[in-house]
Image (cartoon, rainbow, N blue to C red):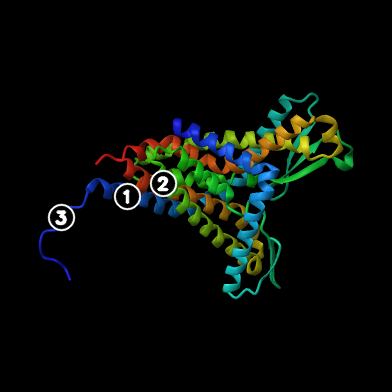
Amino acid sequence: MRFLALFLLLLAGGFTVVSLNWVNDRAIEPFTGWVARASGAALNLLGQEVRMEGTVIRSDRFAVNIRNGCNAVETLLIFGAAVLAFPASWRARLLGLAAGAALIQLVNLVRVVALFLTGAYLPRFFDASHTVVWQTLVVLCGVLLWVLWADRVALRRTAPG
Amino acid sequence: MRSAGPRPARPRTGGRRAGWAVRLLRNAFLWLLPVWAVWTLAAPGYNRLLLAAGEALLHLAESPNVSELLPRAGGHDAYLARRDFPPARTLVRGFRVTDLHFHLVLLGALFLAVPGVPWRERLRNLGWGALATAAFDLLLLLVFVQSVYAVGLGAWSLAHYGPFARNAWGLAEHLLDLPLKLALPFALWAGFYLRLLLDRT
């Protein structure tokens, strides 16, 4: 119960903070821009010949605007709240936060690239992929990363012997 | 090259614990597709149920009853309507009902994936989890309607809701629709199975 109460408190607090205009303008929007640029670079590596216009990734076939909700901040906050609420050493927590954030962003990069390709080549599947499929997959990856961290890092480090 | 001599025994507890988490991960991905298929088939019926229950609850707080939640053809979308608005503006907002509850897929995959728990117990826990999620979906629908009334109808919203109410409904809808909706399956899963994870040390 303590874990759940702390988790929900940290989650609601974290989301309230990132919803503030000041935080959104100075941290979340620039971060979203970085996600868009990284996704654009990945798509160019795949030969899509995209160009960036702010947070819009555009090619001759399709264009997508990377906005809040496409930057995996929700999953990062769920993962972060779960790591901080779990009984573990601070070293294990910091390790979890750093590795988890990197892996979640990697999954999100795959998501944005896959969504762009879906919009370009299978446009009728774009809406369902955008909400149901990829949001579920990214959050599931965050949850499973937390389970692996709790099982293999946090509990192992706190276990006696 | 293989050594023919006796090998040191591996720490059994650690190996089993790591195996549990990896099996959970594998099972969750394996369950994702069947659960998604069931959810897709059930979504139109669940949408109708959600809209009917939501409208009935809205009417408890209204006098006269003016709010309507009208399902659209196809079963996935609906209109929020107000009977007291001029005929041309009765349909105040269209929305996708199915987007309110896709977290049920996550819930199903997580609850069915837990290794080492008898099937009967897994299904019973999933049933309780689904019931809690349905209550959450209903709450989300009601808060969505109130947030449309408070911040989405321009001059009408400004005339009927003060600054505090507009901020409160807007924030409540934002918190419920993004973080809490996405985190709910994990929170419920942790409520049922965190002890199992902790007891493995």
List x then y, in percent, for residue B170: 71, 37
User: Measuring 69% from the left and 49% from the top, which residue is drawn there?
Assistant: A25
Q: Quadrant of residue B146?
A: top right
Q: What residue is drawn where x is 63% and y is 39%?
A: A16
Q: Looking at the image, is B56 positioned above or below residue A37?
A: above
| Amino acid type of the residue that numbered disc 3 sits on in the rendered structure | Pro
Which residue position is annotated with label 1?
B18
Instruction: Please state if B84 lies on the left or on the right of B167 as rendered.
Output: right
On what subunit does the disc labeled 3 rest?
B
Residue B112 location in percent, x, y?
43, 45
C-alpha gap between disc 1 and disc 2: 10 Å
Q: Which chain letter matches label 1?
A: B
Q: Secondary structure at mark 3?
A: loop
Provide the residue designation for mark 3: B8
Does the CB distance between marks 1 and 2 fall below 8 Å? no
The quarter of the rendered structure image containing the N terminus of chain B is bottom left
Residue B119 appears anywhere in the view: yes
Estimate the spatial distance between the alpha carbons at disc 1 and disc 3, rounded to whole Å.
19 Å
Q: Amino acid at mark 2?
A: Val
- Mark 1 vs mark 3, foreground winner is 3
Work out which quarter of the rendered image holds the C terminus of chain B and state it: top left
| Residues marked 1 and 3 touching at CB (< 8 Å) | no
**Residue B146 visible within the image:** no
Kindly identify the amino acid type of the residue bearing the numbered disc 1. Ala
Distance from disc 3 to disc 2, alpha carbons, whole Å, reads: 29 Å
Q: Position of residue A40 (x, y in %)?
A: 62, 67
Q: Residues within 10 Å of mark 2 (few under 14, many from 20)?
A: many
Q: Which residue is mark 2?
A: A147
Badge 3: residue crowd in 10 Å (few <14, some 14–19, many ≥20): few
